[in-house]
Image (cartoon, rainbow, N blue to C red):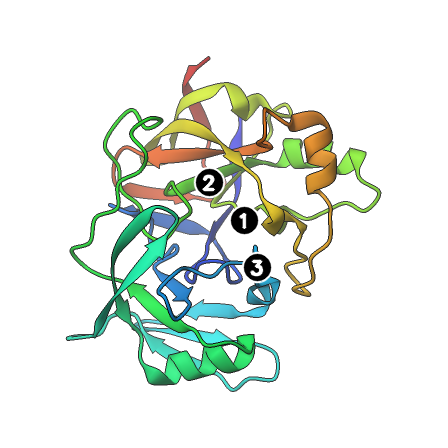
């Protein structure tokens, strides 16, 4: 039976992820995942697509604050919540909504490291961002994710890709939340509903991969692989699907080692 090999969250969108032994789900998805984001002076989100250097920013979870580090920068502490924080309008893809500004110290720190004006924002309580109902079978919401609250990847599928590459790439290129082992390559493509630990999930849509997969997550340097090779055998129209977007159907926890029960498949 497939099992969970590893669990990951990305507290700041497009920055380095955290490896966890257990993940608790709230209404927006894995707790702490993409609850912060960097935006430009127009409020539009920033990502590794245009700023691969974001990969060098490392967040750490504290009891009440996010600790952030980056090469040649002093440590930064950002409150996980802030009473009466100023709200600004932000944009993530087609979503427009209000977010909490994390303050001048954070804005100065990130602007200095990225060498461009930007601000750190926090997901604002009371905001609602629904996932695309064209794919989700039930109403669901997410935070600053690209579109869906959960991304699932398979170790076997990445191993198969690496057999085709001159230089293998690690799993972190694909920025998953759930990594599954003990299944055949691309078996996840046929899944429609699964249960892991306390959580049931609809598998709603393949993840269309972008140039972020070409960014070395340790150096922040972009290349061309594995996207070129992926496109040579996975391309579907003008998209390159790899991994599966999921929507959680209830609250609960998932732990490393939990079995993955396939409830529905195509």
* First in sequence: mark 3 vs mark 2: 3
Which element type, helix, strand or loop, lies under badge 3? loop
Q: Position of residue 197 (x, y in %)?
A: 37, 36
> Is residue 187 placed above or below 154 in the rendered structure?
above
Q: CA distance from mark 2 to mark 1?
A: 8 Å
Q: Which residue lies under the disc numbered 2? A: 151
Q: Position of residue 165 (x, y in %)?
A: 80, 39
Q: For mark 1, what is the residue?
A: 175
Marks 3 and 1, how far apart at CA: 16 Å
Would you name the residue on which mark 3 appears? Answer: 50
SS under mark 1? loop
Q: Is residue 216 above or below residue 257?
A: below
Is 120 situated left or right of 160 in this image?
A: left
State left or right for residue 158 relative to residue 168: left
The answer to whether residue 212 is above or below residue 147 is below
Q: Which mark is on residue 93? A: none
Q: Residue at x 28, y 53 (%)?
A: 96
């Amino acid at each position: 039976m497939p099992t969970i090999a590893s669990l990951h969250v990305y507290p700041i969108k497009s920055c380095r992820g955290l490896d966890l032994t257990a993940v608790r789900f709230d209404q927006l998805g894995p707790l702490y995942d993409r609850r912060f984001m960097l935006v430009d002076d127009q409020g539009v989100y920033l990502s590794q697509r245009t700023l691969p250097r974001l990969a060098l920013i490392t967040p750490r979870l504290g009891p009440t604050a996010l600790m952030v580090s980056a090469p040649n920068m002093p440590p930064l502490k950002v409150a996980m919540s802030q009473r009466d924080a100023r709200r600004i309008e932000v944009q993530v893809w087609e979503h427009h909504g209000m977010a909490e500004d994390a303050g001048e110290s954070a804005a100065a720190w990130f602007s200095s490291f990225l060498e461009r004006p930007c601000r750190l924002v926090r997901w604002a309580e009371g905001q609602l961002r629904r996932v695309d109902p064209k794919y989700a079978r039930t109403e669901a919401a997410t935070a600053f994710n690209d579109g869906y609250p959960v991304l699932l990847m398979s170790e076997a599928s990445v191993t198969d890709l690496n057999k085709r590459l001159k230089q293998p790439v690690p799993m972190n290129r694909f920025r998953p939340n759930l990594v599954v082992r003990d299944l055949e390559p691309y078996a996840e493509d046929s899944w429609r509903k699964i249960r892991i630990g306390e959580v049931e999930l609809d598998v709603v849509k393949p993840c269309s991969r972008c140039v972020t997969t070409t960014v070395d997550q340790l150096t922040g340097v972009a290349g061309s692989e594995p996207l070129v090779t992926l496109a040579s055998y996975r391309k579907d129209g003008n998209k390159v699907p790899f991994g599966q977007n999921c929507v959680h159907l209830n609250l609960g926890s998932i732990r490393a080692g939990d079995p993955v029960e396939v409830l529905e498949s195509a």
